[in-house]
Amino acid sequence: MSDFWPWDELAAGEELLYLRPGQKLDTLKKLRRGHWLVQAELDLHGYASEAARQQVAEFLHAAQQARRRCVRIIHGKGLSSKNAEPVLKLKLRNWLVQRDEVLAFSQARPADGGSGAVLVLLKSKRNP
């Protein structure tokens, strides 16, 4: 997973949103409204970028293997980082769009972490 992707950086306060091409817009709306129960969570507080990338890859793989559909990744708001900006927020977006198992993601609702977390909808794993 690369840190860089061909789009501009997030503007201050911009929401994380993504819908894989070919998916229904309703899917993203349902994700934003909390339609799916969060079945697993990864907290990236305290991780440097490279370690966070590895944690995200392992977490997504394990979640899909365990047939989890919706997961939350807490990237933090960057309050204790240099310049008080979220370091992992943009990187996480870039990493997630490169993962085949990710169908959509959305900034979490305020009760679920708000701008410091993202809800991720994963492809359902077919039975072997």
Image (cartoon, rainbow, N blue to C red):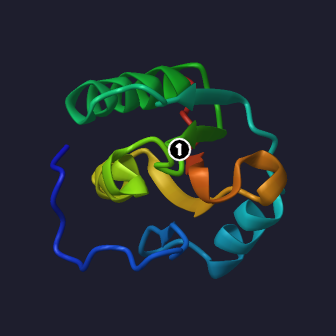
Measured as percent of width and height from the top left, residue 73 is found at 55, 39
Rendering coords of residue 77 (x, y %): 53, 51
Residue 128 visible in the snapshot: no
Task: Mark yes or no: residue 14 visible.
Answer: yes
The residue under the point 55% across, 72% down is 15
- Specify whether 107 is left or right of 56: right
Q: Is residue 24 above or below residue 39?
A: below
**Residue at x-position 53% and y-position 74%:** 13
Question: Based on the displayed image, in which of its 4 quarters is residue 48 positioned?
Answer: top left
Residue nearer the viewer, 82 or 29 = 82
The residue drawn where x is 36% and y is 47% is 88
Looking at this view, is 94 or 70 the one in front? 94
Q: Position of residue 109 (x, y in %)?
A: 77, 59
Q: How many marks?
A: 1
Secondary structure of the residue carrying numbered label 1: loop
Q: How many C-alpha atoms fall within 10 Å of the one at disc 1: few (<14), some, or many (≥20)? A: many
List x then y, in percent, for residue 8. 24, 79
State which quadrant residue 57 falls in: top left
- The one nearer the camera, 3 or 88, is 88
Foreground: 75 or 98? 75
Where does label 1 land, which residue?
76
- Which quadrant holds the N terminus? top left
Label 1 amino acid?
Gly
Asked which quadrant contains residue 32, the reply is bottom right
Q: Which residue is found at the position 72% from the left and 61% from the top?
A: 31
